[in-house]
Amino acid sequence: MSATEYRYALEIFREDGTPIGQVPVSVDFEAARECALFAGMRRNSLAIDEITGNSSILPLWHPDDGRPYLDGFRVAFDGEAGETADDFTGGFATDYFRPAARKASVGLVAEGRLKEGEHFRFRTLAFPAPVGGDSAAATSREARDVSPPLDLRETRLADLMEGALTSGTVDAEDFPVFLPSRVLEEVRELSRGAGAHETGGFLVGHLHRDASLPEIFAEITAQIPARHVISDTSRLTFTQATWTEAQGMLDLRQRGEQWLGWWHRHPCREWCKNCSIESQRVCHLANDFFSEHDRQVHQAVFSRAFNVALVLNDVAFSDATYSLFGWRRGGMEPRGFHVLAGRSVPAS
């Protein structure tokens, strides 16, 4: 399939609509590619062995303003015979360019065209890339290694749903994720001993497929505590020793589990200790908060579309609560999950 390559730019505006300028940006479309691929696999519409590593970004032009303004984009994959399997997500919105806009704003602040902390708006533009043009410009077509096949177990989704309790809002677009109450209890106990610091670990388990629906879903079976970390009140960093020990612990389990994500604690009571309880109750840090550092860790290490992040919110005004985050249309968003409440393993 022949595909036009594009370079991208953002038009930046102040909140009152005053234009600031146009900034070229480089965009990593790998998260969108991974999400589109997984969406197709969930519906049995896209087999990993039927595509090559070539993917294309197809602009969706703004319905009123037209080219070069984007209303979003789609992802397409090339098949072995040259056919194209379009994405199954329904397309990606221009919100996908928000990280690029934040990065561009740093330069605008340095130039004095934007004030530090000033809110702004942006519009996304795409232009055909000239032949032999700037190689640093983001293009619409990339050749990447195909993601490895998923290790799937054939299981009826209804078998796990029976007796499971739902936590948070489950979006129809999100694949089901199951967490045993035992894992949540272990996370809470480990967090209690962390003092004012962040702490965390890894989530392992199995991916299942119910071909009768069709659907793919995740069953988290255990958490592996992260040791040898670097942490303080607002950041958790995994070291090479952390990964070496965690992989050794996973190998010792010998249960065929795979890495499904990670968990960490937000010491909200420490962050907000100088605020009133009333203020803490409505603080955005108290629930469904995922910091920029959290996003960087997740994107760097847990980039598969089925990877999730569990956050324990250690607040002063109630018992600890849990938030789960996962990939949705190329970005990290809070999402619901299912608790296997009646399947705890007795303490030894």
Image (cartoon, grey):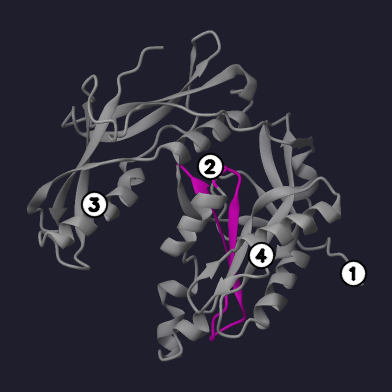
Relative to 332, is 321 above or below? below
- Which residue in the protein does label 2 denote? 173
Relative to 52, is 286 above or below? below
Q: CA distance from mark 3 to mark 4?
A: 33 Å
- Which numbered disc flags the more N-terminal residue, 1 or 2? 2
Q: Residues within 10 Å of mark 1 (few under 14, many from 20)?
A: few
Segment tinted magenta in the rendering = 303-329
- Which numbered disc flags the more N-terminal residue, 2 or 3? 3
- Which numbered disc flags the more N-terminal residue, 3 or 4? 3
- Which residue in the protein does label 3 denote? 104
Q: Residues within 10 Å of mark 3 (few under 14, many from 20)?
A: some
Amino acid bearing label 1: Pro
Q: Residue at x 28, y 55 (%)?
A: 102
Choose mark 1 or mark 4, whichever is in front.
Answer: 4
Amino acid bearing label 2: Glu
Image coords of residue 228 (percent x, y): 65, 70
Choose mark 1 or mark 3, whichever is in front.
Answer: 3
- Which residue in the protein does label 1 denote? 346
Image coords of residue 84 (percent x, y): 47, 16
- Which residue in the protein does label 4 denote? 201
Q: Residues within 10 Å of mark 2 (few under 14, many from 20)?
A: few
